[in-house]
Image (spheres, coloured by chain):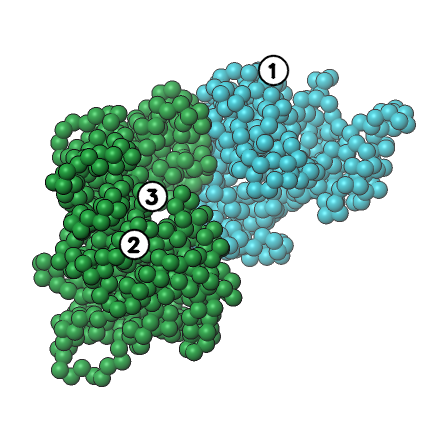
């Protein structure tokens, strides 16, 4: 078979670029059969650089290994299309050859290749270690191939780096403090299993790993041996006051360190609440002055919230509650009674079904929703859209939680009791129950409870508002955003693109106005008061246009190096994204608060296509924006998302 | 075209074939592709020299194309498809100042004229007739079977029905009963009818220059419409001398100075060679790819040499290997047809996948689940390729594929 592969590789090599694709399929057909044979992976590894040079990847994304995404490799290797599997496998093996100094590629150097492979291994740790599992083995040849391939790569690359990469990845995500921590918990569980099975050399990787594993499975000395929740409660009943206080402090430290809450912590807080211990509750929540103050004022309410919402099935609600108290929103008069109403809310049957479908479990949908309310109010910027095209709705929930929490609670009650949401568009009532499904065909079930409840309604209302102003021409967000979100959305709306033609429309004026309204140096140091909805043209790592995306501008401020940045909220689940041409969205280390994303002001402006602004009189007293700044931004935009502006039809209502 | 040499000829390829363009682009001569306008964007994007031309409209404009190519400096036009054979004839009669070439190309395009011409040249052909409607077919079927002294109720000997101007096995039907006749669509008339010959069917690929055979390959059919391999078994190759004489007769009869022909023959049980038909263009079933796999030379590049008036005998001698002796092995392919009426997935049978002779396939996942009934030869779903040293083993392996399911 290697002879055949040689002949086919030569044929592919000789073919002109325009004819390469004719010869790729035969090569892949041989590769996939070769991979299945004993020693086949090694044979393909030997061939891989030659196949790469011959043009096996010509015309596909794999031809640009520098922009390949390690996150999707695992899924590609599981594809039912064997040719795709062969392509991905060969690509990994040629990267391995590059990493080992056996091959070369103009766009990738050995270090990059090695890093990429390490990431792939880290992200597929599960399938990797599961190979000794009988069930996996029985389930088919393809998981076999994936596992054998990953093991082959690991044998060459070494596993120590893998752990390091995985841990760095987890910390990067945790820095953003997402409400949905399921995937992170899964990864940590895998690490725990890996450490257990493999052992690992002592070192900083191991320390970082243990910090994460302990935060989940044994954050305090009372539960460090992961005894199980019942045994732990038993232990608590025998502890003295000093021991209990030590437990409380230990839990609080681990929680605020990682944003993760151990099941033991939930158990502990219930124990503390049941015993009405005035010290242990605030201590285990790790409250600061504001939080302590709220706790003292609203003690009965808080105890009620704990009683109903904090369970071992909803441990994250502990973190939500702590941050809710710390934000001080309870001092805003409608919130405490609204939460009281929430505790007593009885859900509509359809809503109960939907929450049951999404979360299952043994606690009531009401408790599940209340826990979700605590999370959202505690971590407004932790809301993520899941795998749904509903960035508008997710953004709305986040900014309401941040800015208008009693309105959010009002909507939650409407939707919870009546399974509908009533909003108005320019005086005209819109009732979500009367409307067909919006952008998300089915109700999302991979999001937090509040999103599961509200998004189907918000999505429909949003689509209906779009329909109502579809005939007006221009960008519909001009009218929708203020009506949908609230009075605090500024009434002017600037759009960089002419909706009818898709061409850039006075981009220079657009950017100038953005600087004048948002840049403290040019707007008289006026801060952003309320989060403002805005639209960005998202680009991929090659700076190619991907689509329109809804975000919210939170603030403009100088970072620790004095560089002006825009801090914004991205409803996407992971804000850290590479938008190409050096525009990498940062989520920590540049002055971001948890959940914020940031870019330098000019980089942000270069991807912006829509923002809101107050209608203001000419700003005589304010310094003019230098033209070279505008020109720079415009050049960056034209090099990226605006590169092919001209004929592209723009569908703005579908923006996600 | 890094190696183009202006001392050498400038060729025009008539028709769109990516394989041909790729091969010629890698060769050492200047070329231009003449193909329908839809190919223009692709050619521009890939730096392929291109002249848009609509071959659907008939020949009145062939003169225009000829002069356009002449002004461009083209020396000769090479047809890649049946539909461009007469265009090439018309163009070359102008480029090479030889009006005879147009008439010659007409002979290649009309299976009935071709057969008569062969007969006139003393080449042995079977019984044949032209059919303009279904009545003609029925009459021929009856007459052939009467001749064979069949009685009413005896199963008929089949006859072959071939649309006049279609290539290869497209439009080729085997007719046994009046019901078969009813199934022939109107658009396949007029057609050529031939009596059935029992025997060994094979094809020849011959590159010709200065009325001389430069390279002659014999492609052995295992089953017509299913499988073929090259070089042929020793049993067939032992007739090479006679076959060569037959090709020389074709060269004389059809007055072929240069180019590439692809005739089909029958070797009957009484050891007689019958001429089937001949085409003046590359064969279907990727036979050139098989030849390349077996001998290592590219058939399209060979065609360029055979057509180019500026090519020298030294060049040709250096280009072509010695038949049979220089072959690295035997290469064959099998045309896969789904055997079931309803299919949902492609799965290469284990027997095939694990056979050391199996190389690769070009089959696609099924797009439709329901398999349309096969009416004529020549609508396979893709090819599977084989290569090995032993021609008999290869032949039996190809035959065995017919009994296997590639689509489940």
In the rendered structure, the answer to whether residue A436 lies left or right of residue B60 reads left
Q: Nearer the viewer, mark 3 or mark 2?
A: 2
What chain does mark 3 sit on?
A
Q: Nearer the viewer, mark 1 or mark 2?
A: 2
Q: If the image is split into quadrants, where does the C terminus of chain A sit?
A: bottom left
- Provide the residue designation for mark 2: A304
Residue at the (53%, 28%) spot, across then down: B348
Residue at the (77%, 34%) spot, across then down: B175
Direction right: furthest residue:
B152
Whether labels 1 and 3 belong to a single chain: the reply is no
Q: Quick check: B21 above or below A485?
A: above
- Which sits in the foreground, A422 or B140? A422
Across and down, in percent, residue A519 comes to 17, 70
Q: Colour of chain A?
A: green
- Which sits in the foreground, A153 or B271? A153
In terms of image quadrants, where is residue A70? top left
**Reading the chain from its start, which is encountered first: label 3 or label 2?**
2
Q: Nearer the viewer, mark 1 or mark 3?
A: 3
- Provide the residue designation for mark 3: A313
Q: Quick check: A628 above or below B281?
A: below
Q: How many callouts does the rendering have?
A: 3
Residue A529 in sight in this render: yes
């Amino acid at each position: 078979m290697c002879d055949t592969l040689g002949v086919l590789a030569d044929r592919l090599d000789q073919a002109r670029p325009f004819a390469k694709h004719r010869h790729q399929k035969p090569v892949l057909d041989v590769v996939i059969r070769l991979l299945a044979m004993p020693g086949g992976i090694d044979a393909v590894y030997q061939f891989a650089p030659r196949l790469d040079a011959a043009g096996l990847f010509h015309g596909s994304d794999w031809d640009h290994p520098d922009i390949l995404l390690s996150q999707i490799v695992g899924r590609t290797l599981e594809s039912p299309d064997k040719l795709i599997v062969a392509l991905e496998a060969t690509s990994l093996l040629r990267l391995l050859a590059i990493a080992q100094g056996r091959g070369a590629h103009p766009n990738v150097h050995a270090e990059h290749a090695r890093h990429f492979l390490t990431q792939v291994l880290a992200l597929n740790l599960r399938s990797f270690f599961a190979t000794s599992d009988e069930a996996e083995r029985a389930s088919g040849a393809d998981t076999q191939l994936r596992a054998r391939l990953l093991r082959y790569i690991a044998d060459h690359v070494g596993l120590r780096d893998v752990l390091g990469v995985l841990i760095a990845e987890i910390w990067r995500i945790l820095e953003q403090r997402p409400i949905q921590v399921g995937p992170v918990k899964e990864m940590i569980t895998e690490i725990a299993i890996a450490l257990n099975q493999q052992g690992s050399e002592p070192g900083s990787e191991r320390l970082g790993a243990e910090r994460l594993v302990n935060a989940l499975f044994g954050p305090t000395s009372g539960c460090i041996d992961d005894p199980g929740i019942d045994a732990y409660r038993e232990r608590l009943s025998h502890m003295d006051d000093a021991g209990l206080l030590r437990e409380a402090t230990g839990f609080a430290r681990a929680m605020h360190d990682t944003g993760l809450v151990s099941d033991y912590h939930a158990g502990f807080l219930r124990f503390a609440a049941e015993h009405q211990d005035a010290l242990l509750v605030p201590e285990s929540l790790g409250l600061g002055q504001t939080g302590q103050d709220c706790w003292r004022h609203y003690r009965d309410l808080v105890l009620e919230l704990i009683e109903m919402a904090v369970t071992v099935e909803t441990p994250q609600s502990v973190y939500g509650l702590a941050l809710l108290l710390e934000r001080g929103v309870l001092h805003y008069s409608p919130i405490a009674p609204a939460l009281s109403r929430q505790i007593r809310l009885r859900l509509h049957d359809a809503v109960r079904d939907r929450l049951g479908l999404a979360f299952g479990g043994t606690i009531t949908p009401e408790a599940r929703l209340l826990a979700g309310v605590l999370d959202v109010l505690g971590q407004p910027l932790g809301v993520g859209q899941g795998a749904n095209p509903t960035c508008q709705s997710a953004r709305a929930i986040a900014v309401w939680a941040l800015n208008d929490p009693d309105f959010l609670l009002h909507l939650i009650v409407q939707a919870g009791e009546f399974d509908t949401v009533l909003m108005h568009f320019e005086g005209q009532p819109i009732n979500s129950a009367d409307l067909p499904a919006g952008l998300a065909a089915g109700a999302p079930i991979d999001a937090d409870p509040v999103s599961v409840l509200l998004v189907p309604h918000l999505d429909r209302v949003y689509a209906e508002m779009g329909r109502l102003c579809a005939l007006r021409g221009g960008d519909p967000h001009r009218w929708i955003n203020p009506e949908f979100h609230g009075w605090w959305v500024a009434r002017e709306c600037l759009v960089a693109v002419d909706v009818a033609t898709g061409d850039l429309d006075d981009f220079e004026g657009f950017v100038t106005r953005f600087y004048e309204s948002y840049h403290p140096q040019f707007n008289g140091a006026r801060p952003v008061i309320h989060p403002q909805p805005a639209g960005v043209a998202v680009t991929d790592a090659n700076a190619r246009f991907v689509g329109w995306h809804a975000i919210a501008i939170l603030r403009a401020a100088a970072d620790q190096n004095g560089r002006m940045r825009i801090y914004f909220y991205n409803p996407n689940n992971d804000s850290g994204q590479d938008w190409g041409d050096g525009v990498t969205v940062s989520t920590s280390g540049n002055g971001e608060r948890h959940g914020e994303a940031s870019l330098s002001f000019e980089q942000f402006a270069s991807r912006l296509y829509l923002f809101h602004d107050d209608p203001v009189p000419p700003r005589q007293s304010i310094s003019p924006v230098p033209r070279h700044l505008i020109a720079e931004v415009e050049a960056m935009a034209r090099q990226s998302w605006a590169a092919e502006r001209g004929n592209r039809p723009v569908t703005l209502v579908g923006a996600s | 075209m890094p190696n183009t040499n202006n001392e050498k000829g400038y060729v025009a390829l008539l028709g769109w074939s990516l394989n041909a363009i790729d091969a010629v682009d890698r060769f050492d001569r200047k070329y231009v592709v003449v193909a329908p306008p839809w190919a223009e964007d692709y050619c521009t994007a890939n730096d392929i020299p291109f002249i848009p031309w609509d071959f659907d409209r008939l020949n009145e404009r062939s003169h225009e194309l000829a002069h356009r190519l002449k002004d461009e400096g083209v020396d000769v036009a090479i047809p890649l498809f049946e539909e461009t054979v007469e265009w090439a004839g018309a163009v070359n009669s102008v480029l090479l100042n030889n009006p005879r070439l147009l008439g010659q190309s007409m002979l290649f395009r009309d299976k009935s004229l071709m057969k008569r011409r062969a007969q006139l040249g003393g080449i042995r052909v079977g019984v044949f007739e032209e059919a303009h409607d279904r009545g003609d077919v029925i009459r021929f079927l009856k007459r052939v079977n009467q001749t064979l002294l069949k009685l009413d109720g005896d199963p008929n000997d089949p006859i072959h029905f071939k649309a006049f101007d279609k290539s290869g096995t497209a439009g080729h039907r085997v007719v046994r009963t009046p019901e078969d006749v009813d199934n022939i669509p109107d658009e396949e008339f007029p057609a050529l009818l031939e009596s059935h010959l029992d025997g060994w069917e094979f094809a020849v690929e011959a590159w010709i220059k200065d009325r001389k055979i430069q390279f002659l390959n014999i492609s052995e059919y295992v089953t017509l419409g299913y499988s073929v391999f090259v070089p042929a078994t020793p049993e067939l190759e032992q007739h090479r001398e006679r076959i060569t004489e037959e090709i020389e007769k074709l060269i004389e009869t059809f007055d072929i100075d240069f180019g590439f022909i692809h005739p089909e023959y029958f070797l009957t049980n009484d050891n007689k060679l019958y001429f089937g038909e001949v085409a003046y263009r590359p064969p279907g079933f990727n036979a050139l790819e098989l030849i390349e796999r077996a001998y290592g030379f590219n058939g399209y590049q060979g065609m360029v040499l055979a057509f180019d008036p500026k090519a020298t005998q030294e060049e040709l001698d250096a280009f072509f290997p010695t038949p049979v002796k220089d072959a690295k092995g035997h290469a064959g392919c099998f045309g896969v047809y789904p055997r079931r009426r309803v299919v949902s997935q492609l799965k290469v049978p284990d027997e095939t996948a694990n056979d050391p002779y199996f190389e690769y396939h070009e089959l696609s996942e099924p797009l439709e689940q329901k398999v349309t009934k096969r009416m004529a030869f020549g609508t396979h779903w893709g090819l599977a390729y084989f290569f090995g040293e032993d021609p008999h083993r290869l032949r039996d392996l190809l035959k065995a594929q017919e009994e296997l399911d590639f689509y489940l």
